[in-house]
Amino acid sequence: MTSRQSENPVPATSDATELSRRRFLQGSVLVGFSAFLAACTGSTPSVSAVPASINIPTAPPVSLTPSAPPTPLPSPTGPLKFANWPAYIDLVGSAGTNGVYAKGSSPTIEQFKKKYGVDVDYVEAIEDNKTFYAKIQAQLQAGTPTGWDLIVITDWLAAKVISKGWAEPIIPADVPNAVANLVDSLKNRPWDADNAYHYPWQSGMTGIGYNKKSLKAAGIADPTSLAHLWAIKSDKVSFLTESRDTFGLGLLKLGKSADPATTTSDDLQAVHDDIKPLVNAGLIFADNSYLNNFASKKTWAAMVWSGDLASSGSADDVFQVPDEGVMIWTDNMVIPKGAANKYTAELMINFVYDPKIAAQIEDYVFYVCPVKGADLEIKKIDAAAATNPLIFPPADVQAKFHNFQFLSTDLETSLDSLYLDLTGG
Amino acid sequence: MTAVVVVTTPPRPSLLRRVARLAPYILLTPGLLWLLYFFIWPLAQMTLMSLSSGTLDSGFHVTGTLKSFSDALTKFGTQWGNSLIFGGTSTILDFLIGFPVAYTIAFKGGRYKNLLLFMVIAPFFTSFLIRTISWQILLGDEGPVLAFLKHTLGILPVDFSILYSPVAVVSGLTYNFLPFMILPMYVALEKIDFRLLEAAGDLYGSSWQTFRRVTFPLALPGVFAGTILTFIPAMGDYVNAELLGSPKTRMIGNVIQGRFMQSTDYPSASALSLLLMLGILVAVAIYARALGTEELTG
C-alpha cells in the first residue's frame, strides 16, 4: 500500500479507556504548584538555555542534494524498529497498567500503522542513555546498521551521535508537521541548529517524587526541598541511574549552580562526598524501576522524572519541584545511520508532530510537550491536562529550570568515575 | 635375456580409507572453528584490550600498559570479596539444599523420579531476569513473606527489610543456580549400584557408615561438577547483585558491567574479566586437587 493518501490527521479517538489513567493526575500534580494558569496561553518552556562556553558538539553539514529533481515519494517500508523508554507513549488496557507495550496497546502506534499500512516494532529498549549507547556504539562506529530505525536519546547523547555523523539527515519536506510545530524554545539548539538530524520527543523535569501514604505512615512531612529528600531514611530513598540527573540535583542541593559552564570537578567531588554517606546508609540507584519500588513500599521518596508518576504511578505518588531548582532535559528522536526504514521513521516523526497525536501522547505520558498547538488539542480531550503544570510548566517553575547536559570531556570523565564509585560498580 | 621391469606402484589408498583417516579431524572441525571464533579470538581481543588505553570516542590503542591490571587488583577489594563470599555462600547453600533433594529423588523417587526432576527444572523455563525480578516482590518490605511475618505474626519489626541486602543477593544466587547443583549430583547418585550399599550392610556397616564410606564417595564426581557449575556462574553473576542488592553489595560482575556499559572503559573491564577467569581457573584447579582427580574421572 502506498500511502500518504490522506493528508488529514487521524482523528484522536475519544474512547474513554484511553484516558483512564488521567485519574492519577489529580492527586499527583497539584502539590507544589500554585500559579500555573499562565500555561494556558500556550507559552512553552525555554529548555535550551545552554551557555555558549561549553563545548557542545556540532552537527556535520548535511550532504543532501537539494537541487535533485523531485522524485516520486518513496513508499513506507517496515517494520519500523522504534526504540523508546518505558511508559513513554500512550498505552491502553492492561499494557497501560503494566507499563509494557503490547500489540494494539498504543493508539498512536496503531493509528500510524493503519494510516501508512506499515508495521511498527515499538520496543521499550532504552533504560538509560549510557547503556543503550554502549549497545549501538560499535555498529555505528563500524558503519553497520544498528537494527533501529528511530531512537529516542537525551540531549547530550543526541549531540554526540549527531556530531560523529552517525545520524541520518531528516529531510524537511518529509516532516512538514515537525517543521511547522516544533516549539520555538527547542529550535536552534547549538548542536543541530536547523534540526537536520533530530526532533524532540519529550522534555521533562527531574525532581522529587514521593509516595504520600508511605511518608505519612512513617510520620515524615512531604518533602519540598532536596535537603528534605536527603534527610529521609536513606534505605527508603533512591536516586537516578542517569548520572547527570543525580549530580545535577546534587549540585543544586549544595547551593551550587548546576551550570556545566561553571561547574568544576571539585564541585562534582563535593556532590559525591555529600551522597556517599547516604549510600553507606542504604541509598540505591534506580531507573524507571522507582515506580515498582513506590508500589512495593521499598522506596518512599526518590529522584524521579516528571511524567512517570502521573502516567504510571498510583494516586498517592506525587511529583514535587524542589525549592532549590529542577533539572530540565529533552529526549530527541534520531534516525541512526544505516536505518533500513528511514522514510518510515520520518513519517513517524511527522506523525507525532501532528498536534492531535501529540495531545493524545501527552495525555498519557505527562511530559513537557514540544509540539505547538498540542495544548489546544488536549483541551478537547482532557481539559484538566491543558493546564497541567507537568505538561505545560508555569513561569515560576520555568524560572527554576537547570540544564546539566553538555559537559566538557574532563567533567564527563570525572562524573563517570565518581558516579561509578557511588554505585559500587 | 631381457629383464622385465615391473613397475610397481604403491597401492593407492582408496578414497574411502583416506576419508576415514581424516574423519576425526573433519568431525572436530565445526567444534574447533566454533571455539576459535567464539572463544580463542575474543579471548585474544580481550587480552589486547586489557593492555590498551584510550577512550571510546578517541579509540583504544594497544600500549602495553598494565595500569588496568593494577587498578583491577587494587581498587575493587570490596567487590572481589563480595563475589567470593556471595558466590561461595550460595554454592554451599545450594549443596546443603540440593544434596538431600538429589538423594531423595535418586533413591526414594520411585516412579515419581521424572516428575520430581521436572519439578526441579520447571521454574527455569521462565527467563532468568523475570525470576530474579520476582524475588524483588517476594522479598519486598510488604511482600508476601515479610508482610506475613510483620503484620500477621508480628514477630518482625515493621521496618525490617531484606531486599537490597547481602541476604537478598545470596538468596537470589542460591535460587537461580540450584538446578545446576541438583542435576549433576542426581546423575551421580542415580547410577550408584544398589548392590554396593547392600554389600556394605552385609558387612555390618550402619546406614551412616554406608553413606559416608560408600554413597558419598561414589557421588563425589557429581558434587564436584555441581559445585563447579554453581560457583563459577555465581561468582561472575551481576544480575542478582544489581536487582536484589544495593551499591554496597556489588560483585565483581557489576564492576565489569559498569566498566563496559556505563563508563565504556573497555581496558579495565577486560583486565577484570581476565583476572576473574584466571582466579576461577586457579580455584578450580586447587579444588580438583583437593578432592582427588582420579576419583572424579571414575
Image (cartoon, rainbow, N blue to C red):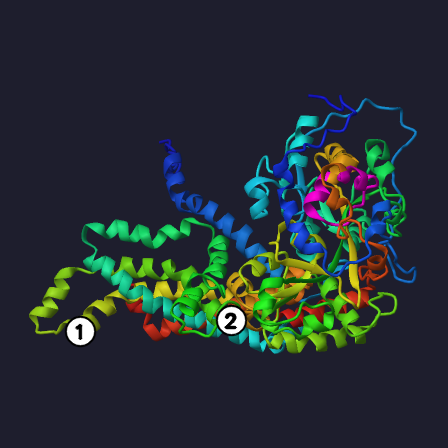
Element type at marker 2? loop
- Element carrying mark 1: helix
Q: Amino acid at mark 1?
A: Trp
Closer to viewer: mark 2 or mark 1:
2
Residue A285 covered by magenta stretch: no
Residue A329 placed where, x, y %? 78, 55
Residue at point 49% right, 63% down?
B140
The correct choice, above or below, for B117 with respect to B181 in the image is above
Magenta highlight range: A360-379
- Judge left or right: residue A397 versus residue A417: right
Predominant secondary structure in magenta?
A: helix
Report the front residue among B58 and A188.
A188
**What residue type is disc 2 on?**
Ser
Mark pair 2, 1: CA separation? 38 Å
How many other residues sit within 10 Å of disc 2, few (<14), some (14-19) or many (≥20)?
Answer: some
Q: Quadrant of the N terminus of chain B?
A: top left
Residue A174 appears at what percent x and percent y? 82, 32
